[in-house]
Amino acid sequence: MSNKSYEVKHARMSDEMQRDALQCVLMAEYMYKDNNDIATFIVKEFDRKHQPSWYCVVGNFGSYLPSSYYLKHSTRSKGFFYYIIN
């Protein structure tokens, strides 16, 4: 693993779910290099563990930071998670 730092910018989910999201990201980054593959893995894991229907966006989003992640449940008001990787 690299020496990346992860910073949660905004979350509306439990601490346990946040840890699970970060664990999914770390695993996905280890297994895949493509942002679409990383997002697909995270969605499949969250659908399996926390009931469907999740969506995830991974990318640069025009910022100077190398990667940002946005994870949200499609129908629940909670379950929102946004963080950046330096």
Image (tube, rainbow, N blue to C red):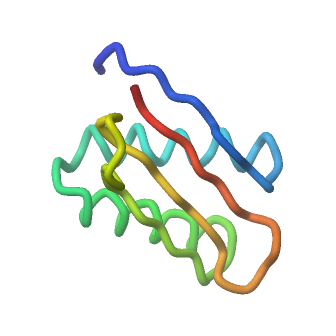
Q: Please give the name of the residue rendered at 51% of the width and 28% of the height, measured from the top-left corner.
A: 6
Is residue 33 positioned above or below 2 on the image? below
Q: Is residue 32 left or right of residue 79?
A: left
Quarter of the image with the C terminus is: top left
Quarter of the image with the N terminus is: top left
Residue 46 in picture, x, y percent from top left: 57, 65
Q: Please give the name of the residue rendered at 70% of the width and 46% of the height, measured from the top-left corner.
A: 10
Q: Please give the name of the residue rendered at 62% of the width and 82% of the height, measured from the top-left corner.
A: 52
Residue 24 in picture, x, y percent from top left: 48, 48
Q: Is residue 51 left or right of residue 25?
A: right
How many numbered marks, from 0 up?
A: 0
Is residue 81 positioned above or below 9 on the image? below
Picture quarter containing residue 85?
Answer: top left
Q: Is residue 72 left or right of residue 36?
A: right
Considering every residue shown, the one lying at the far left of the view is: 33
Considering every residue shown, the one lying at the far top of the view is: 3
Q: Nearer the viewer, residue 2 or 65?
A: 65
Q: Nearer the viewer, residue 83 or 27?
A: 83
Picture quarter containing residue 44?
Answer: bottom left
Residue 21 in picture, x, y percent from top left: 58, 48
Q: Please give the name of the residue rendered at 81% of the width and 67% of the height, measured from the top-left corner.
A: 78
Residue 29 in picture, x, y percent from top left: 30, 42
